[in-house]
Amino acid sequence: MKFLVINPGSTSTKIAIFDNDHSLFEENIIHTVDELKPYKHINDQMSYRKDLIEKHLLLWKIEGSKLDAIIGRGGLLPPVKAGAYEINEQMIKVLLSKETVEHASNLAALIAFELSNEFGLKSYIYDSVAVDQLEDVARLSGSPLIPRTSFTHALNTRAMAHAHALACGKTYEQMNFIVAHLGGGISVNAHKKGRLIDVIPDDEGTFSPERAGRVPCNALMELCYSGRFDKQDLKKQMRGKGGIVAYLGTNDVKSVVEKAEAGDQSCELVLDAMTYQVAKSIGEMATVLEGDIDAIILTGGIAYSKYVTERIKKRVAFLADTVIMPGEHEMKALAEGVGRAIRGDEEIHQFI
């Protein structure tokens, strides 16, 4: 089966052609600030990005009608099940609604649906960021005004859990994992027998290169009413200008590690604090799984850093074996997931 996979980000659109789970072509199309400037809303970029994708299909000599399906990254939908959804008119209507939070990932389904109609194919999303399999006990935050929700790195963490289970000669549904996604944002998730039962999203746990993570609640409320920031500025301080960049002025973890190894004590302290907090979050998820953990998986771009992963492993070694699966494998995860669904190994959900 041949798939076109589409994964839009805020300043780029990743596209690929997969033959089953083998990548034939891949491209990361970069969008400059000037190119995006004419578009007031993210959804206004749809035709612009769709045209660029079609140009690459021509360049790659890929006929749309010869594809088996088009796959888009799932956007900020209302809570959905894990796995594959066929893109339909209802989904498009919700993604275009003013009530839906604007996010570049929403463009994936919009573009995939238009192209699939042009080519006479079906289109799908897989493991939307809105995947919600939380157990009821995990939904209570302590205030009914602020229920806990499941916004996390579902796609990559579930893909790594599937892959490690396969390497163990088992299925995802037979094993329990704690998966930490270490990227621009850091999330830690508990996977129990094929379900993502609890999450620590990138605003509830450890700080990261660009996120402040969990901060003291009372102090945050004081800051909100201090007059120092308006709402948007303060959100930026928590998400975009928080974490490592707030302490050290850079979000480049590789350079921070190099400075720490060269003896920079400020860099060493910040990295130690971040890895300390990741380990604390893993400990939280260990209690969710009642200690029944087949493996702890560290994934995402920062997992390439041995400096970071070794410090996390040292703190969590008593819980379970730690497996390093670095990088973000979203494109392959999308192709593999929808491939399983089309073959009948997983259910294809209908969005209602």
Image: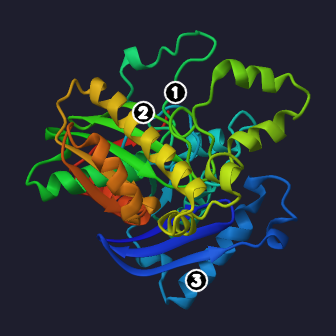
On the image, the x and y values in percent for residue 61 come to 49, 90
Three-letter amino acid code at the position of disc 1: Thr
Judged from the image, the secondary structure of the residue bearing numbered disc 2 is strand
For the residues marked 1 and 2, what is the alpha-carbon distance in whole angstroms?
9 Å
Q: Is residue 141 above or below residue 66?
A: above
Three-letter amino acid code at the position of disc 3: His
Residue drawn at x 36%, y 59% is: 333
Three-letter amino acid code at the position of disc 2: Val
On the image, the x and y values in percent for residue 284 come to 36, 28
Q: Which residue is mark 1?
A: 149
Q: Which mark, residue 56?
A: 3
Q: Is residue 275 above or below residue 23?
A: above
Q: Nearer the viewer, residue 265 or 319?
A: 265
Judged from the image, the secondary structure of the residue bearing numbered disc 1 is loop
Whether pointer 3 and pointer 2 mark residues with C-beta atoms closer than 8 Å, the reply is no
Mark positioned earlier in the residue sequence (1 or 2): 1
For the residues marked 1 and 3, what is the alpha-carbon distance in whole angstroms?
37 Å
> Callout 1: 10 Å neighbours few (<14), some, many (20+)?
many
Residue drawn at x 33%, y 32% is: 283
* Tally of numbered discs: 3
Residue drawn at x 50%, y 31% is: 79
Nearer to us of marks 1 and 2 is 2
> Callout 3: 10 Å neighbours few (<14), some, many (20+)?
some
For the residues marked 3 and 2, what is the alpha-carbon distance in whole angstroms?
37 Å
